[in-house]
Amino acid sequence: MNWLRSHSIKTHVIVFIMMLVLLFGLVNIIATNKISAVRHAIDIRHQLAAKAEVAKALLTMQQNMLIATNKFIDSDETHQQLYDAGYYGYWRDIRALQSGMLPATVTAIELYDRRGNALARPAGSDMPSRVQGLPALWMGNHGGRIYAYLLRSIYDGYSKTQRSGYVLIRFDFIAALRETMPFLDVSMQGLSADIASNEHLTMDETVSRLRYQVNASPDVDALFAVMQTTQYQVLAVLLTLSFLLYVVVMRFIARPLANLSTHIHLLRDHPKSHDAPEFNQHLYVIELENVRRSLNNYQHQLDSMHRRIEDKNQALWTMAHKDGLTGAYNRLGYDEDIASLVNAVALQPVAVSLILIDCDKFKAINDSHGHQVGDEVLITLVKLIQSCLRVADKLYRIGGDEFVVVLTNTDAEYSEALGQRLLAAVAECDLHLLALSEPLTISIGIAHALVSDAQTLTYLHKCADQSMYQAKQQTAPKLVVCDVAMT
């Protein structure tokens, strides 16, 4: 039950369909195996019948050829050639083959005397000149065709006890086998024998070299085809019903629930995305529709709460990183930005300019006119400085009346020009509204370098601080650019 509670409806439906398909597949496999076993048994019986048919054909062919050869041997013309070979060549090559006593598959005849020597030069290269010691029947491959060679003894025509000679008959083995009898289980189209050229085999050896194809059984094939088609049709019906079930469940239950879950995950993973869309899909199940409406109400409340939290976080960040009086960044903001700059220059050197600014005689103004006037002076000074800066440039208040500007990717000329603009802006400022009789002045120290590590940045701040101190000590000019010699 725990497993069932930990998965979605879609998963359960898919698992159910898979189990149904697997169950049918198991039944189908069992049925297929049984059908295959029956088919295999039928094929084995068919192959055995074909083998028996071939064996019967071989025996019948051999018997028929022996009968024809014995008839040929008993003819007067055959005996006459052994005693008078005057026209043996004509008789062997033409007369004997056309006599009709031998089957049409016989392609060559050769006679031998009682010592086994050919009466004349053999007609073919595969016909031996001596037959002494040769088997009574053998097979060979001559010119790409399989021939059978049948050797028989010729005895005296009267007593049949005195051997007069031998006859060797060559016939087309495959053709003779095909003409022996009508084949039912063996296909004659693929009948052949694997005998190499000039190789001679006995009949027993030839049987193992025979190659033939078993005739197909159309009725059996049709029966098994129907059974297989029926299995496929049942499977198709099952898959169709499973697909319809899946579509219905997904359309009305699983997909709406999945969309609800996705929307909830969006709210959970992106709590600051106030512009997340509402879940407006209409659900056909009443319980799910109630959940949808409750979720949208919860989303509105959550967005409102997030906005209030972000506003407060922003206010806290501003209080921590900006000066409450002037609005410039404070010492904490400066330290964090310097730390980030150290990480950046470690990857790639950056041209950095530090401009330190100090308000001259600020303590005297504070003591003479009060802290309120002193605060207004600082506020006015910050506004003047920021008016001369670029949008991306930051101004930091790092002391009571001490400020610093950090410029990156600028050259020394730009930094010095900015310092001149700051002096001019402060000099033109009218402070009569603050009841100050003396003009406001500032001292500026500038240091510029290509920074690649924290030590260089520390040195740069020290150099700018020394330059500002030097500017503060002199009446004019009130801007000093750092010189390595003075450090």
Image (cartoon, grey):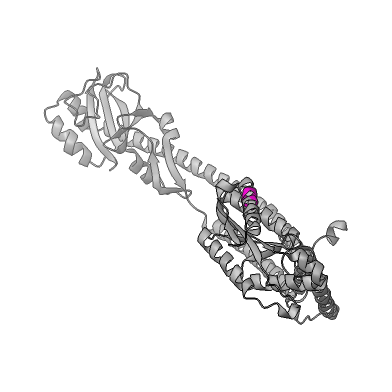
Is residue 461 inside the magenta stretch?
A: yes
* Magenta highlight range: 457-462
Question: Closest to the observer: 383 or 471?
Answer: 471
Where residue 323 appears, as percent x and y from the top left, is 76, 66
Question: Closest to the observer: 106 or 287?
Answer: 287
Question: Closest to the observer: 361 or 340?
Answer: 361
Q: Residue at x 67, y 65 (%)?
A: 395
When asked about the image quadrant of residue 31, the answer is bottom right
Is residue 173 inside the magenta stretch?
A: no
The answer to whether residue 351 is above or below residue 241 is: above
The answer to whether residue 214 is above or below residue 85 is: below
Quadrant of the image for the N terminus?
A: bottom right
Residue 318 visible (yes or no): no
Where residue 23 appears, as percent x and y from the top left, is 74, 58
Magenta segment, principal secondary structure? Answer: helix
Where residue 309 appears, as percent x and y from the top left, is 82, 71
Tell me: 81 left or right of 370. Answer: left
Q: Residue at x 27, y 38 (%)?
A: 106
Where residue 76 appears, as percent x and y from the top left, is 22, 31
Tell me: 60 left or right of 287. Answer: left
Tell me: 354 left or right of 272. Answer: left
When asked about the image quadrant of residue 436, the answer is bottom right
Residue 51 visible (yes or no): yes
Question: Closest to the observer: 43 or 457?
Answer: 457
Q: Residue at x 32, y 22 (%)?
A: 134
Tell me: 471 left or right of 300. Answer: left
